[in-house]
Amino acid sequence: MNLFELVAFMVCMLCGVIAGTIGFNMGGALIALVSGVAGLLLPVGVMAVTVWCASRLRKLRPPRPTCENGKCHWDEYEVVDCHGDEVIFVCRCGNKYASSGRRFLRVLDDGRKEPYMILVDKHTWKVDNQD
Ligand SMILES: [Zn+2]
């Protein structure tokens, strides 16, 4: 059990105990048991819904396209620089990219930038032909 699991376990137990105590004060042992179990499961449900929503949002609008080598996904880039509204990323392969507005540009070794991908609607990256 790592630290996160331990904290999650303790939060679940605490919610169970609190809900169980409230249930006991309201209507006795049976209600205490039911509300205790419900309280125990509540944080698990909240966490599951949060994780599900976050993954849906990321799928709907990947903030960065897959890299040129097709190896690195949107969450595998590292921010290395940023000026104005332009953010410079490096993927795990070592390629450099610049993100500016809807465009994602490849930054060459000599500093020149080539069009790479463009966000054509809310959810889709397409090859940028610069037209
Ligand atoms: Zn890569």
Image (cartoon, rainbow, N blue to C red):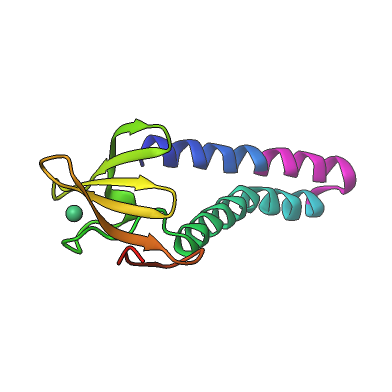
Q: Residue at x 59, y 57 (%)?
A: 49
Where 115 falls versus 97 (above or below)? below
Q: Quadrant of residue 85?
A: top left
Location of residue 118 in the rendering, given as x and y in whole percent from the top left corner: 37, 61
- Name the image quarter holding the C terminus: bottom left
Q: What residue is shown at x 66% (from left), y 44% (from top)?
A: 16
Q: Is residue 42 magenta?
A: no
Q: Is residue 18 magenta?
A: yes
The residue lying toward the viewer, choosing from 86 and 94, is 86
Residue 108 horizontal side relative to residue 43, left or right: left
Q: Which residues are magenta?
A: 16-29
Which residue: 39% across, 34% down?
3
Q: Position of residue 23 (x, y in %)?
A: 81, 46
Question: What secondary structure characterizes most of the magenta part?
Answer: helix
- Where ligand 1 lies, by quadrant? bottom left
Q: Is residue 88 above or below residue 113?
A: above
